[in-house]
Image: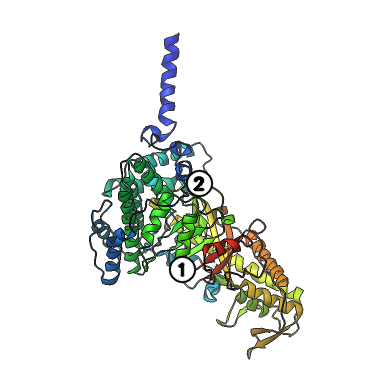
């Protein structure tokens, strides 16, 4: 009897062992790092949260920053003379190899072919499906002029997955997902997801077979981890060099590997800092290569001031030597920022480096979001993001008062009616028509974004980049508006009747002169009313794959070290909007930024 039970039980146990997790086929570094969800599931953020090592003391371990001169000279030589010099004692993928990979890229726009039809570019498919109203909105610059001409950069890979897990573990994880999908209802989305995952597996297998440094297994040391990041970047670029992507915040991830080797005496402090300098030098080299071809490849870093690591200071030690060879730094300020990091921020502000401060209330704790070049938070392991260029809200004012006519292009947003021909305008009627204008705008935004997202995902997908994402994607749409404070004052002028209108020969209004003054509270209330109206209209329209949309506003008023923004803005807890002081802020030091941010939720860009 016992033998019969054993005979039936053992195969079942073996089956559970084989299919419990992919951990059995690829051994992870659980001996060196604190285990957690990241062991059984692809989850880099969990790995970082469990293994990060905050550092709050003086960074006395830093080497002389002049040691990095050869790296800076290499970048300067390439920018000025287009020559590639050797970096001494290269430890990572060589510059010659990187240059060889980049120069071999076929710089031809991707095309898609239906059966025997002529292959089509992205703009061809867009033009075949776009509506006439949307064409007019583009000509009126309610959408950017180049809207729909190129594949948008919506797929941002979490390149940290490659060194942490190795390509073989990631492939196995995808195959497990396919197995899991067999249990679900076979809907259209189910079929599309299976097709997408199979494409991802195919792209990863080609990477493993064809790329000289495919990172098959998890990184064992810092050089492995940095080479894995570089390999993921280079191969993701090869997938489509015309479409850029963002890099997630890397400093905490790199720090975990560096600190482990320094504590176990496998690496000296100088060796670690030179490796970090070499890594960022090569990222910048890639960026400058594409700049010469007028293609944007964005290298930036996101820094969480509440929890710096030793590698935060190692990074800044190298960054200080770059001078004009700089890239943007996104900073999340915090009242408990250590003095040593405050001193670095103060120096960057004096030198007018490209830094940006974003209020911590815009982000969730322990999520380790990265910040895009436009100031939007995102998670590379799950978010599919579509950014929209800013729209001038004052243009919406004139569209409303002229019944839908754009006097600069002579196009109509909608059939002209309710044009305000009389000098005395009833505010309630004007507000009702303004609401209609905003409704039309967001209807077109929905159509435009849904079309772009659908074409990008179904016909111009990037399976290698997408393979570094979670199984379930979150779709996000970001919309930007300028001059909301100016619009608020124009609205108040109509409401109180203190204005004079100028019209052209056809009777359309071309400008409004405000004769009165308004209190800060009146303007604040009107800004809140407008922002609430925008949010209501945004919530009304559907977005592709039930995506979530967010708005941010660029504000006009300059900030100073002693003067906060004079209007009261709705906090993010009340209204999920994002207010940005764009290239207007003037502060002397980091403490002044903290003082302002204690009263306002700010996004301050220098």
- Residue drawn where x is 42% and y is 56% of the image: 247
Query: What residue would you read off at disc 2?
Result: 472
Query: What residue would you read off at disc 1?
Result: 350
Left/right placement of residue 392 relative to residue 13 reads right
- Using the image, determine if residue 388 lies above or below residue 39: below
Q: Is residue 157 visible?
A: no
| Residue, far bottom | 505
Name the element at disc 1: helix
Residue 361: image x %, image y %? 59, 55
Picture quadrant of residue 316: bottom left
Residue 546: image x %, image y %? 57, 53
Residues at marks 1 and 2 touching, judged by CB atoms closer than 8 Å: no
Left/right placement of residue 286 relative to residue 485 reads left
Of the 4 image quadrants, the one containing the N terminus is top left
Q: Is residue 275 visible?
A: yes
Dot 2 alpha-carbon crowd within 10 angstroms: few under 14, some 14 to 19, many 20 or more: few
Question: Which is more toward the observer, 526 or 349?
Answer: 349
- Using the image, determine if residue 373 lies above or below residue 215: below
Question: Which is more toward the observer, 43 or 36?
Answer: 36
Residue 280: image x %, image y %? 35, 57
Left/right placement of residue 538 relative to residue 303 reads right
């Amino acid at each position: 009897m016992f033998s019969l039970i054993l005979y039936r039980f053992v195969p079942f146990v073996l089956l559970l062992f084989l299919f419990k997790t992919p951990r059995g086929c690829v051994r992870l570094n659980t001996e060196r790092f604190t285990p957690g969800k990241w062991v059984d599931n692809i989850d880099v953020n969990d790995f970082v949260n469990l293994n990060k090592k905050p550092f709050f003391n003086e960074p006395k371990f830093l080497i002389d920053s002049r040691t990095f001169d050869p790296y800076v000279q290499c970048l300067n030589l390439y920018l000025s003379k287009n020559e590639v010099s050797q970096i001494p004692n290269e430890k990572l993928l060589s510059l010659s190899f990187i240059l060889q990979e980049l120069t071999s890229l076929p710089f031809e726009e991707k095309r898609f072919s239906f059966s025997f039809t002529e292959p089509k570019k992205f703009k061809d498919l867009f033009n075949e499906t776009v509506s006439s109203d949307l064409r007019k909105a583009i000509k009126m610059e309610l959408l950017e002029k180049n809207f729909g001409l190129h594949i948008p950069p919506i797929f941002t890979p979490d390149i940290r997955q490659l060194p942490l897990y190795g390509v073989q573990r990631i492939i196995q994880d995808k195959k497990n997902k396919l197995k899991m999908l067999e249990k679900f209802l076979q809907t259209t989305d189910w079929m599309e997801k299976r097709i997408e995952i199979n494409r991802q597996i195919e792209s990863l297998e080609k990477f493993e077979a064809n790329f000289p440094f495919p990172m098959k297994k998890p990184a064992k040391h810092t050089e492995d981890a940095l080479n894995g990041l570089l390999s993921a970047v280079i191969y993701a670029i090869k997938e489509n060099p015309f479409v850029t992507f963002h890099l997630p915040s890397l400093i905490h991830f790199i720090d975990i590997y560096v600190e482990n080797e320094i504590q176990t005496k496998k690496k000296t402090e100088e060796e670690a800092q030179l490796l970090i300098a070499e890594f960022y030098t090569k990222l910048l080299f890639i960026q400058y290569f594409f700049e010469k071809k007028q293609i944007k490849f964005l290298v930036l870093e996101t820094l969480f001031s509440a929890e710096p690591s030793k590698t935060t200071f190692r990074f800044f030690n190298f960054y200080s030597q770059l001078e004009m060879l700089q890239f943007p730094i996104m900073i999340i300020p915090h009242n408990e920022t250590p003095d040593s990091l405050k001193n670095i921020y103060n120096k960057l502000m004096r030198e007018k480096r490209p830094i940006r401060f974003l209020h911590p209330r815009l982000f969730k704790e322990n999520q380790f979001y990265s910040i895009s070049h436009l100031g939007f938070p995102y998670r590379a392991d799950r978010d599919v993001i579509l950014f929209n260029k800013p729209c001038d809200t004052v243009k919406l004012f004139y569209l409303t008062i002229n019944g839908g006519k754009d006097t600069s292009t002579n196009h109509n947003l909608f059939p002209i009616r309710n044009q305000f021909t009389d000098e005395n305008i009833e505010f309630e009627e004007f507000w009702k028509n303004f609401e209609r204008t905003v409704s039309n705008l967001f209807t077109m935004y929905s159509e435009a974004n849904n079309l772009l997202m659908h074409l990008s995902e179904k016909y111009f997908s990037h399976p290698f980049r997408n393979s570094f994402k979670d199984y379930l994607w979150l779709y996000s749409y970001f919309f930007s508006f300028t001059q909301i404070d100016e619009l608020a004052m124009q609205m108040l002028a109509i409401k109180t009747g203190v204005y004079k209108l100028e019209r052209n020969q056809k009777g359309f209004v071309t400008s409004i002169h405000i004769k009165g003054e308004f209190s800060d509270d009146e303007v604040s209330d009107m800004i809140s009313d407008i922002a609430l109206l925008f949010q209501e209209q945004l919530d009304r329209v559907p977005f592709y794959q039930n995506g979530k949309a967010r708005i941010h506003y660029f504000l006009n008023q300059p900030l100073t070290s002693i003067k906060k923004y004079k209007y009261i803005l709705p906090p993010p807890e009340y209204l999920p909007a994002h207010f940005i002081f764009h290239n207007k802020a003037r502060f002397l030091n980091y403490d002044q930024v903290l003082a302002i941010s204690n009263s306002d939720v700010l996004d301050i860009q220098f």
